[in-house]
């Protein structure tokens, strides 16, 4: 058994994790085998997140005064948390893909950017492009506009050079 002081340290460490984590998914994991749990943890780490099996009352106590308080109150059944302060889309995609392969893994609640979301919204979040894809598209659009501007400006000089060249060839300009 843990000493009370150790339990309080664990509670404080968990509270600090909840304060840092802007994105969190509360899940149920009943009837997962050890191998499936290992794969799940590996998947979450690969998406840049943390995974933790937690007691419901401990989660509720640690979440008091944090944005996660709304989604971690009144939990029932076996509960685990996947959380990150990075890209929520990558974590949602990883968890959704895992849930499709393992139907016993379910979503209970979610929080994105400190706001509680519904379970069906997690599926919608997983269908969004990742942060890197969005940034690449924005950079492409910025670069394409700049490239078109340079092409247009270069075209004016090129057209002027063609007109001058034709004038010289036809002796329309006196030397």
Image: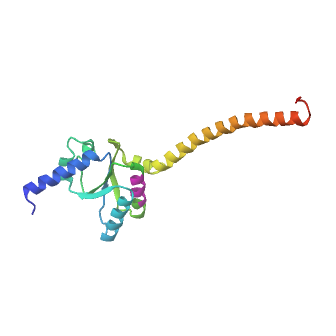
Left or right, residue 163 beside residue 46: right
Magenta: main secondary structure:
helix
Question: Residue 102 appears at what percent x and percent y?
Answer: 39, 64
Residue bounds of the magenta highlight = 90-97
| 17 and 98: which is toward the camera | 17
Question: Residue 152 appears at what percent x and percent y?
Answer: 69, 36
The N terminus is located in which quarter?
bottom left
| Image quadrant in which you'd find residue 22 | top left
Q: Is residue 158 above or below residue 84?
A: above
Whether residue 74 is visible to the viewer of this picture, yes or no, is no
- Identity of the residue furthest to the front in this view: 175
Please tell me which residue is depicted at 11% across the width and 57% down the height of the picture: 6
Please tell me which residue is depicted at 35% across the width and 60% down the height of the picture: 45
| Image quadrant in which you'd find residue 173 | top right
Labels in figure, total: 0
Question: Residue 117 appears at what percent x and percent y?
Answer: 36, 44
Whether residue 151 is visible to the viewer of this picture, yes or no, is yes
Magenta-colored stretch includes residue 159: no
The C terminus is located in which quarter?
top right
- Identity of the residue furthest to the right in this view: 170
């Amino acid at each position: 058994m843990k000493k009370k002081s150790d339990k309080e340290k664990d509670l404080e460490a968990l509270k600090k994790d909840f304060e840092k984590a802007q994105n969190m998914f509360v899940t149920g994991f009943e009837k997962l085998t050890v191998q499936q749990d290992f794969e799940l943890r590996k998947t979450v780490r690969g998406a840049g997140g943390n995974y933790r099996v937690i007691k419901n009352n401990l989660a509720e106590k640690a979440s008091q005064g944090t944005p996660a308080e709304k989604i971690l109150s009144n939990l029932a059944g076996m509960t685990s948390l996947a959380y990150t302060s990075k890209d929520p889309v990558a974590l949602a995609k990883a968890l959704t893909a895992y849930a499709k392969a393992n139907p016993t893994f379910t979503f209970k609640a979610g929080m994105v950017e400190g706001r509680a979301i519904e379970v069906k919204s997690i599926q919608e979040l997983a269908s969004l492009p990742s942060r890197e894809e969005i940034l690449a598209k924005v950079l492409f659009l910025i670069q394409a506009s700049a490239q078109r501007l340079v092409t247009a400006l270069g075209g004016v000089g090129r057209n002027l050079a063609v007109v001058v060249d034709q004038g010289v060839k036809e002796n329309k300009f006196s030397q």
